[in-house]
Amino acid sequence: MHIITSKKLRDFANKHGDVDVQLGAWESMVKHAKWNNAADVKMQFPYVSVLKNDRFCFNLKGNHYRLAVKVLFNAQQVLIRFIGTHADYDRIDANTV
């Protein structure tokens, strides 16, 4: 998978060093993945939340942070739509962001 706007991940990790290692591991796993559908994502990340419109929410650092992405399966791309604290996530609509 190709991660679009992975700069957002690096910028977030620079501000929140406590999640740097976990974000790096997530990024590495996703870059080496080949997902064709939501079941493939769930197989690799069993605790991911499957949202509407091919969007997914990953819990990071013990659910302290959340990462919302949109997956374009045909293009093999993952678009970073949101990364922030759990409280920030509660203020957005992850199905449309």
Image: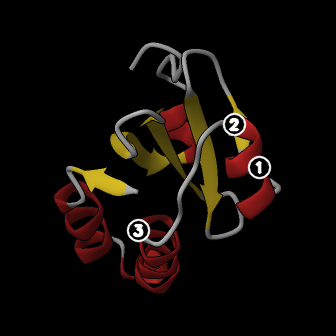
Q: Is residue 41 above or below residue 30?
A: above
Question: Relative to residue 44, is residue 28 drawn left or right?
Answer: left
Q: Which residue: 34% across, 37% down? A: 75
Badge 2 density bin: few <14, some 14–19, many ≥20, Cα 10 Å: some
- Cβ–Cβ under 8 Å for marks 3 and 2: no
Q: Residue under label 3, please give it.
A: 31
Q: Is residue 82 above or below residue 34?
A: above
Q: Quadrant of residue 78?
A: top left
Badge 1 density bin: few <14, some 14–19, many ≥20, Cα 10 Å: some
Q: CA distance from mark 3 to mark 1?
A: 16 Å
Identify the image quadrant of the N terminus.
bottom left
Image location (x, y in percent) of residue 7? 17, 60
Q: CA distance from mark 1 to mark 2?
A: 6 Å
- Towards the viewer: 28 or 17: 28
Image location (x, y in percent) of residue 29? 52, 73
Q: Which residue: 20% across, 50% down? A: 5
* Residue type at tag 2: Ala
Q: Residue under label 2, please give it.
A: 38
- Cβ–Cβ under 8 Å for marks 3 and 1: no
- Cβ–Cβ under 8 Å for marks 1 and 2: yes
Q: Residue under label 1, please give it.
A: 42
Badge 3 density bin: few <14, some 14–19, many ≥20, Cα 10 Å: some
* Residue type at tag 3: Lys
- Towards the viewer: 51 or 19: 51
SS at circle 2: helix
Q: How many marks?
A: 3
